[in-house]
Amino acid sequence: MYVSWDETCQKLKMQSGNRCKFVSKSNTKQKVDPGTGVVSEVNDNFIFLFRNACPELRALSLEKPLAFTVLLFFIEHMNRRNAIQILQQDLCLALDRQRNVISQAISILKQRRFIDSERNGSSVIYHVNAQVFWSAPAKEKALAFLDAPLKKAPVKRKVGITQKRRSVPVVSVTEKKSLQAKSNEASVVAQMPSSPPYYDERSLKQLIKELL
């Protein structure tokens, strides 16, 4: 049995004791089934966000906030095939930013494969990656200009001051003297013959005569 939206809302209100407020139907539309003529409410004006792209989106929002803002602007105004055509000067006016910083933000989005672009006369058509956002049916995804995995942001490993100090050995004065003494002993031992000298009988007699 078909239950309309109004009937469903009324039933939920009665169950909740009118304690909850329901959102407006501005993001829904009526769809008529051509076979049965039944009118139903379906979602409208929405975009799919794929979960596996969330880590890279989160990193982009923290590291490059302006690039993230530009990406949101593209998503807000793109068509059902993830494309938006706009002059860069109009993009600068819309976001109230200088052209050089906007160009840098777009370059970052391209490097990380969030978007791609193509020239169309004096303007540029920007294409948002279909593996991040998509709003058309899945069967139309093959028509997307850009449908590829994202590139991970380069990891910058910074060595802190404490880490640098740990890599340098610290020797106290007493330890230094002890090490110097050990070094001297080692040099004396190295200069000593490893085994006593060998004298044959003739050499021994000659050595005795010299001593006497």
Image (cartoon, rainbow, N blue to C red):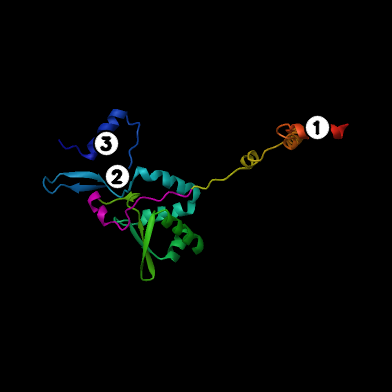
Amino acid type shown at disc 3:
Cys
Distance from the alpha carbon under mark 1 to that under mark 3: 126 Å
> Image quarter for residue 107?
bottom left
Q: Relative to 179, does residue 59 appear above or below in the rendering?
A: below
- Categorize mark 1 by other alpha carbons within 10 Å: few (<14), some (14-19), many (20+): few
For residue 120, side relative to residue 191 (left or right): left
Distance from the alpha carbon under mark 1 to that under mark 2: 123 Å
Residue at the limit of the structure toward the right, as seen here: 212
Distance from the alpha carbon under mark 2 to that under mark 3: 11 Å
Q: Nearer the viewer, mark 1 or mark 2?
A: 1
Could you tell me which secondary element the residue under label 3 belongs to? helix
Asked if residue 96 can be seen in this view, the reply is no
Q: Nearer the viewer, mark 1 or mark 3?
A: 1
Which residue has dot 3 on it? 9
Which residue has dot 1 on it? 205
| Coordinates of residue 128 in the picture (x, y in percent) | 36, 55
| Residues drawn in magenta | 137-154
Determine the main secondary structure of the stretch shown in magenta: loop
**Numbered circle sitting on residue 25:** 2
- Categorize mark 2 by other alpha carbons within 10 Å: few (<14), some (14-19), many (20+): few
Asked if residue 165 can be seen in this view, the reply is yes
For residue 141, side relative to residue 165 (left or right): left
164 or 152: nearer the viewer: 164
Amino acid type shown at disc 1:
Lys
| Coordinates of residue 46 in the picture (x, y in percent) | 31, 48
> What residue is drawn where x is 26% and y is 57%?
143
Q: Which of the two discs, 1 and 3, labels the residue nearer the N terminus?
A: 3
Could you tell me which secondary element the residue under label 2 belongs to? loop
> What residue is drawn where x is 37% and y is 59%?
116
Amino acid type shown at disc 2:
Lys
> What residue is drawn where x is 54% and y is 45%?
157
